[in-house]
Image (cartoon, rainbow, N blue to C red):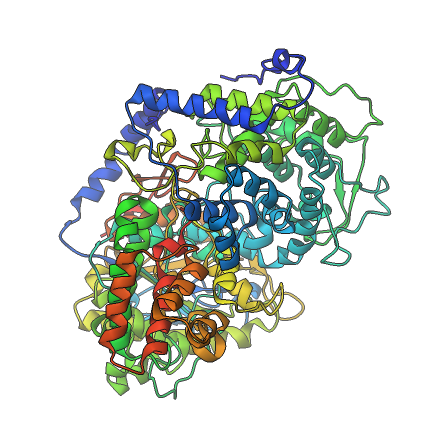
Amino acid sequence: MRSLITLSTIAGLVSSGMAGPPDPQELADRIDARIDSRLKDEGVPASAVADDAEFLRRAYLDLTGRIPLPSDVYGFLSDDSADKRGRLIDELLETPRHASHMAAVWRDALAPETASLPEARVFRPGFEAWLRLQFRANTPYDRLARELLTAPLSGDPDEPTPVLRRPNDPNPLAFFAVKEAKPENLAAVTTRVFLGVQIECAQCHDHPFGEWTREQFWNQAAFFAGLDRSGDGLFAPIAERNDVRDIQIAEGKKRAAALFLDEQAPSGNNGSSLRGELAAWVTSKENSYFARTAANRVWGLMFGLGIVDPVDDFHDDNPPSHPELLDDLADALVEADFDLRYLIRAIGRTKAYQRTSAMAAPSQSDTRLLARMPVKGLTGEQLYDSLLTATGVRDSGNRSSSREQFLTRFTLAGKLSEPETSIPQALALMNGRFTANATTLATSPTLTAACDFPGLTIAERVEMLYLSTLSRKPTAKEQDRIEKYVAAAGTGQLNERLADLFWVLINSAEFRLNH
Amino acid sequence: MTPFISRREAFRYGLAGLGLVPALAAYAAHNPARKRSCIVLWMSGGPSQLDTFDPKPGHKNGGPFKAIETAVPGVQIGEYLPEVAKQMKHLAAVRSMATREGDHGRATLHLRTGNLPQGAIRFPVFGSLVAKDKDVPDSDLPGFVSISPRFGAASLSAGFLGPKFAPLVVGGNGTVFDATGDDNTGGLRVENLGLASGVTGERASERRGLLDDLEADFLESRPGIATESHKSAYQRAARLMRESAAKAFDLSEEDAKLRDRYGRNRFGQGCLLARRLVERDVPFVEVTLGGWDTHDNNFAQVKNLCGTLDPAWATLMADLKDRGLLETTTVVWMGEFGRTPGINPRNGRDHYPNAWSVVLGGGGINGGQVIGRTSPDGMSVEERPVSVPDLLGTICHAIGIDPAGQNMSNVNRPIRVVDATTKPIQELLS
């Protein structure tokens, strides 16, 4: 069985005659209507709105990849204006940290090899730098995809283009290099990340679970068949030959020609770049898969799970949780000319995004209904950057070995909405050097401030540590418990007890998770 | 909730199930009450089969080493494994491994997960699959310990099984082996297991008490995998820090003479640690011995490596036997591939996946035999080719795991413990 991607499902909506993208609040209301009506149908109550501190921490982690500073928390809590949540989302989207965070997220989706393969790590800064430029400029997502897929390559195999010049320079070719410029690898990542289709399982045999045939996989690979790598290894320079229009199917004699997933042939002649044709087809406004996958991916970032989940696995047996909602988002994204920030502005304004993650009723157990905010894990980067923010410890440099070690140990395992903690991770946070330094006066700026700042009450010192780590004020119950803890040690032990509290906060589930 | 198996797939699995009846029957024949463990001696770099378990004396590819008799009449192995030769009754050499990957990274992943990279699926390594299958929720020790591994993260990853089943690494990259160190672990310690300096046991337990109290409300209000996993990891880490569990890693409890017999080096002491762990019911332990990538000067290097391997492995077999553990502990000797029968101009041997050897022994294994045969020049498998799934399926049966068992993967599809193509080596199973 094979199914074709139909190209015209949303074409009618595109030409609805609107002048520009609607107000993000308008889309937010439509989103909430879809989610609320589903909750009503299922008889599941929604949780209450998150308080300001919970919302603030979530927005910072989701949009900038780290927790807010205590001053950010104080500022937000003391702001009385009604539209402050929407404004915060808008402001965070304009920060350089937002671009860096999005670059890290897309780098991980497009080129996970830059973290998992030691020899490919040198490509990481350059690829992230290129993505960062795109996100800083808010390059429309379709253009970003096209510019990546069609990154310029020499047409002369005798003078191929180097894939790595200076590691820190923005470098889209890193993407091709870490895929070893292999058509199979590039076809797989392109269809998976940009179209949500995992066609690569059909590489060796017809897709056992879905709709794709082995030949269709090689039809996709053929779009990259002209890539010509001079030599082996990740660092070999690459050229592109436009006269190569088909590819030999692995371990067979048959050749497959370039065909889009809708079985149409590219229109161009031998002089055109097949990569360019593929990029144009993939990112076409008429290609519903592209917009839906992009919208679903952004949704997944903010809620921890996609409307189709996993976010890059669209197929018949994996239906969306809210089909109409996904259509709404895709349409809105197309109307907004693939402005991802517009989508984030709208999602950030929904009641659904602003709900607390605390459970209100056991019937909320199906996280996909979004009756409450799913609890998300932190990526290694989010945790590391949040630890630096909380402790005031400065990173000794972008590629320092402590950061690398940390990211390797704390690589997010499992789904974003179902993160797991390992024993070595727990041991590292309990007994490791980073925590030891952070909880020792001489090496911990935050702890030093909390202990040494003159004239504060114990409760105020405790509050300072809470704001630095959990981005909220302690409750009366917590203050009470801590007061007893401090008193139990007798006099003269306050600093030691505050260090203990800081250890507790860094090791708490509330710090470790994005709720 | 969406059902994760469609009718079409269920039909497919039904068919697959029918084909598996003999395998499942063999599985059921094992006594389920026996706790079984597996120790893998991982020869990183790819050990030379011609100079160890598939000698070719008299052929120019055989090289300068002699072949020696073993405790099993008619079975010969390389001359630098004399102590292992004495244990041959408990060991079976498979001389017909036939695989395809000749690149260290890909071959290592293939042998360790049973799969080659496939798209977004994060395959767990075999040890994690065993740990998951044999999980004892309240045990102080983890289900998978990897001793002095030299792998990249992917080859130590529990993949879609999640970090709960990731190996606990002892003596990882960057640790220095120090046989004279006063902590008596020889550098084989669990990272961050000890309290940070200046923190007393009393203070640590006060901290943990405060942590439990202060995070109780958060955990209760946010039930789910994220909070449960966090809590469980901290509990397991705390249990591991207990004296009784930490003792498992304290080699100073062992008789000094026995430690000498294993060899006062990282691998020898690692084998001893492996025994201590299976003694405490850890189901899967691996000990890595690196340095087998002998492109240059193969013979001097292999001789040297055998000097470490031979006493450690032979002592491990004898020690397990003495303690009545050998019947329930399957011991596997393997690397990611073998080496070229032809000797290169640098007197070395290069990567060779086409025809190579692994050795299985101990629990569940009919020792004292040789499986498969290579050609006189060692270039090809002439009899009983064994694939990666065949090998892993055989180990599954030896340790009492159903290779057809399934785990839900990160791409929302159930994936078998071992690929459906597996044909376990029946004549090897006791």
| Residue B98 drawn at (x, y percent) | 47, 49
Residue B150 in the image: x percent, y percent?
Answer: 48, 65
- Above or below, A478 against A252 in this view is below
Q: Is residue A48 visible?
A: yes
**A156 displayed left or right of A472:** right
Write the residue at 76% across / 40% down. A151
Residue drawn 81% across the image and 30% down it: A243
- Give the camera-side residue of B415 and A451: A451
**Residue A121 percent location from the top left of the image:** 62, 57
Residue A198 visible in image? no
Between A66 and A223, the one nearer to me in the picture: A66
Labels in figure, total: 0
Give the vertical position of A349 relative to A379 (above or below).
Answer: above
Q: Residue A389 at what x, y percent from top left? A: 52, 61
Give the quadrant of residue B377. bottom right
Q: Viewed as shown, does residue A93 lie left or right of A405?
A: right
Front in this rendered view, residue B117 or B189: B189
Q: At 35% across and 55% down in the image, what residue appears? A: A509
Looking at the image, which is closer to me, A435 or A173?
A435
* Quarter of image, res B23: top left
Residue B228 in the image: above or below residue A279: below
